[in-house]
Amino acid sequence: MANYSTNEFKAGLKIMLDGEPCNVLENEYVKPGKGQAFNRVKIRKLISGKVLEKTFKSGDSVEGADVMDTELTYLYNDGEFYHFMNNETFEQIAADEKAVGESVKWLVENDNCTITLWNGSPIVVTPPNFVELEITETDPGLKGDTAGTGGKPATLVTGAVVRVPLFVQRGEVIRVDTRSGEYVSRAQK
Amino acid sequence: MNSSVNWRPTATIQTLKKRAEINTQIREFFAHRNVLEVETPVLAHASVTDIHLQGFCTQFNSPLKPETENLFLQTSPEFAMKRLLCAGSGSIFQICKSFRNEESGKHHNPEFTMLEWYRVGFNSSQLIDEIDELLQKILKTDPLDRLTYQQAFLTYCDIDPLCCTLEDLKRKAEYFGFTNIAQHETSKDVLLQLLCSQVVEPKIGLVKPVALTDFPASQAALARIKQDDPRVAERFEIYFKGLELANGYYELTDVKEQLSRFENDNQVRQQTGLPEVGLDEHLMAAMENGLPDCSGVALGVDRLVMLACEVQNIDQVMSFSIGNA
């Protein structure tokens, strides 16, 4: 993999740091009038998701990370691995629990997910921004309630718990924003 | 015609009005004190040896000479102003453009405006007093605090910058999370500059400006070494709200020492693969003639306007910053 100098660091560049692939978020130039220049770089560690700041001497270089995002369709879980398929090549890839992480609660069969591959292996699974899931459990709501006055918790078919308006009932399919984990609407039939 | 081109100023017209007002205030301030306003060349035959400054170079094709000549955009008006002092100008000030290659960011633009002034007969403490008065006038600040470099490091890094070894500094840099730099660094000054800019600066001058004084002798630049403590130089910096605002010296007048510092810079340049820089022979000749006892300071006008307008990015105080200059 190529090396990148601090002046090539820009948002989206993938670099290796402490043995872990990272995504550059921000790159700030810091220099005293008299003295060494530095770059203060904000990065996200791709595996742990941790965001941190790292300072480099301007002109220093680091190794790039062989990281790419690919759009794959979620097929099924065999109890250990989560299987995804490339719709063009029909090639299948299995991601482990660690790569799927919190996203497990938004995985819907046949939905397209973004799989981040490092050296060809999946490290992060990002669900679509919106998913539609059935409610398996929620208290019956009060009649006459129209929208979001506090709401109530609802358990979805994947185990995710989302606050929904009181009028939404068990068995209904709802649309959820996976980035915030918030209810959006009832699913369009 | 390309309508997607961003032709608009990066500063608001209101900010530009404030900027003009500050320029007027600065000129009033010095007129009141009988400090002469001067103009010196932006384009000159020599650049600076400072290993952390890169000048812009351009070519002059004279209509009267067959050969092309290299000329440099000045990184500060210091050398030309010192020649005026040597020629008997008395105290002088200048508001001018300065140029530094490889500098761009939230607080840097490769072309920027500098206010530089020299006070004949002043020591650094008297000059700090005068800077304080200027800041109080323009930014309505409280009187500034003074803090030595050593006190600052003892307080915020728990290390004595004047006695510590390279190993001590490496350990300290690792402690603050700079292992990647500390591992390979062989220069004490680079580690001191790292800790100063990343650990000390964010904690000082937050409510009122602070003058950080008595920099280590190894970072003296063009300041004289302190007579009663040769470990430190008569160099100071002013910081306010996270910005490095000014850098000043009780000026070195000893031409021999000045020459040896320049030569030392060039040696370091050679060792680190940086281009050597020809010495400014006009400055050397002038200093041989005699630089009067004086103190001088360079203050970033763009940053002063940033503070006055409470904006975070240098683009916001420039009519057109480098992105659409």
Image (spheres, coloured by chain):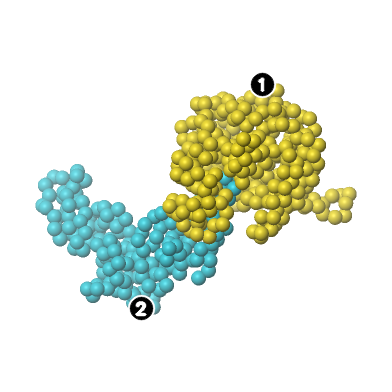
**Colour cyan belongs to chain:** A
Q: Is residue A81 above or below residue B49?
A: below
B21 or B236, which lies in front? B236
Chain letter belonging to callout 2: A
> Which residue is at a point 67% across and 28% down the rendered structure image?
B122
Q: Is residue B54 left or right of residue B144?
A: right
Q: Colour of chain B?
A: yellow
Amino acid on which the number 1 mark rests in the picture:
His
Q: CA distance from mark 1 to mark 2?
A: 81 Å
Give percent across and percent down for residue B48.
Answer: 70, 47
Q: Quadrant of residue B67?
A: bottom right
The numbered disc on residue B32 is: 1
> Which residue is at a point 54% across and 57% down the rendered structure image?
B185
A98 or B203, which lies in front? B203
Label 2: which secondary element: loop
Residue at numbered disc 2: A90
Label 1: which secondary element: helix
> Which residue is at a point 63% across and 50% down the rendered structure image?
B52
Neighbor class of circle 1 (other Cα within 10 Å; few <14, some 14-19, many 20+) is few
Q: Quadrant of residue B25?
A: top right
Select label 1 or label 2 by which is in front: 1
Amino acid on which the number 2 mark rests in the picture:
Phe
Give percent across and percent down for residue B157.
Answer: 46, 45
Q: Is residue B90 left or right of residue B162?
A: right
Q: Quadrant of residue A132?
A: bottom left
> Which residue is at a point 34% across and 75% down the rendered structure image?
A93
A177 or B308, which lies in front? B308
